[in-house]
Amino acid sequence: MTRNASTPRTEPLFHDVEFRVRYAETDQMGVVYHTNYLVWCEVGRTDFIRARGMSYADMERAGVGLAVSELTARFHAAARYDDTVRVRTTLAEVRSRGITFDYLITDVASGRRLVTARTALVSIDSSGRPTALPANVRALFVDE
Amino acid sequence: MTRNASTPRTEPLFHDVEFRVRYAETDQMGVVYHTNYLVWCEVGRTDFIRARGMSYADMERAGVGLAVSELTARFHAAARYDDTVRVRTTLAEVRSRGITFDYLITDVASGRRLVTARTALVSIDSSGRPTALPANVRALFVDE
Amino acid sequence: MTRNASTPRTEPLFHDVEFRVRYAETDQMGVVYHTNYLVWCEVGRTDFIRARGMSYADMERAGVGLAVSELTARFHAAARYDDTVRVRTTLAEVRSRGITFDYLITDVASGRRLVTARTALVSIDSSGRPTALPANVRALFVDE
Amino acid sequence: MTRNASTPRTEPLFHDVEFRVRYAETDQMGVVYHTNYLVWCEVGRTDFIRARGMSYADMERAGVGLAVSELTARFHAAARYDDTVRVRTTLAEVRSRGITFDYLITDVASGRRLVTARTALVSIDSSGRPTALPANVRALFVDE
């Protein structure tokens, strides 16, 4: 987590997490099945939120969820079994009822870019209805 | 669903369901990743219960779940992408607090046996504690 | 598969497939985990191609694969366990080195729109390099 | 990896790996879907083999695979999203054509036992036929 506290608007918040590709994540093309990169984005997002000081598990227990409403992804190159990959999650936008994150997945050994993605999330209550992002969640991401 | 109503104890209850193998279910060996056969067993079990007259979704809404407590499987031959497979689910045992099912997964085109498996399920309440199988659920499987 | 043979350019090719939501596809929000809708798009695409007269499995055996290069999705409403869903796959564009498909996933009982998505696929050879779409594959989708 | 070199037969080889539960691994019961514990066993097995000095990815590139032929598992307690779990993989047996591993999955915070499992793997060549375990692979696990 790198952050320049004095210029919050120009220095984007981001967070890195690394892990190895699982055998179960490959398909018969010999590379990672494409939707698994999007599961990794969620791993990156979870880790980003925890690094800001609140676990997403606690958010849900407090009655607020974040549901993916839009997703875009570009697949530049393929990850393979046992490769170590890095997911860089960057805060793109905080809205009254949601948050948008960008993702860059790279191969650690080569530095090669594998996937770029963006997800928009909406804040929902425990019955699944859109709701305003609670102040304590919003404060994790925005200086006000 | 085949069943001889006059000899319920000697003629086991079973149910067949067929579907095609998904690309996402393969791995880099070029065949189905082994844990996916166990997902198919759950598809077979769900369909078996529905064919007996109650959906498992309704069971859960009524506050009763069935959680897998034990699982054994033998992998005899591999399924491949786009093959049509059949899951035969057979009722093995009904206990006061659980049910055991057997599964036979075959390749429809060749009739070849792919996987045999057994799962023991325990009846749990909505907080996850073991509980007696409700009478209306038990009645789906046992003539009394 | 509906198609007006005399006006191929104005009547889009599409194909529908229906199946039930699996338990394994849900998450702790009580609905389908978002990346599983994208697996369903692949099920729709596979079925579309088969309905045109060639299985994607055969395409791969002939040395040509289709790899997802771009993906966009909007999640409008959630599917739940045991719901029957329909995936409508529509041919959006055929390029010299790829194909783009659109997807509409609906809940069959209510007719409600759940997810809309688009994937661009690139034609690759058996070593993963981009290659021209073979004439016999192209002919499945374009009247020339 | 703990090992007493002077008494290889009485001190079993084992290896530990820890990671957090992913959101995608939960189901609508609010806990980890049961087949995902078996994916974790493969993560443990891969890490064990790497710690012995050879990656399973290299084994496959050298033309030898290990396919799961039998699996047994007992589910004692459930893991939840964001929990840190430990998979302890222990070498149970080395045969001329295969290896058997035992697994113990625990919750790191509480030390609670979640799942115990065993998998028998058979050594296969690149066309999927059973073959003798190569000497260099065997040597990773047995002192001779």
Image (cartoon, coloured by chain):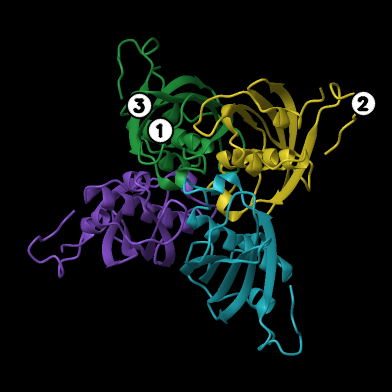
Chain colours: A yellow, B purple, C green, D cyan
Q: Residue at x 72, y 43 (%)?
A: A47
Q: Mark 3 — residue?
A: C15
Instruction: Give the chain of mark 3.
Output: C
Q: Mark 2 — residue?
A: A6
Quote the CA–CA distance across marks 3 and 1: 8 Å
For residue A43, above or below residue D39: above
Query: How packed is label 2: few (under 14 Cα within 10 Å), some, or many (20 or more)?
Result: few
Earlier-in-chain disc, 3 versus 1? 3
From the viewer's perspective, is C129 left or right of C23? right
How far across and down, in percent of the image, does residue A124 sit? Answer: 56, 29
Q: Residue at x 36, y 49 (%)?
A: B83
| Quarter of the image where one finds residue B94 | bottom left
The reply to whether the C-beta atoms of the residues labelled 2 and 1 are less than 8 Å apart is no
Mark 3: which amino acid? Answer: His
The reply to whether the C-beta atoms of the residues labelled 3 and 1 are less than 8 Å apart is yes
Quote the CA–CA distance across marks 2 and 3: 55 Å
Please say whether residue A40 is visible from this viewpoint: no
The residue closer to the viewer here, C143 or B50, is: B50
How far across and down, in percent of the image, does residue C16 sit? Answer: 34, 28
Instruction: Give the chain of mark 2.
Output: A
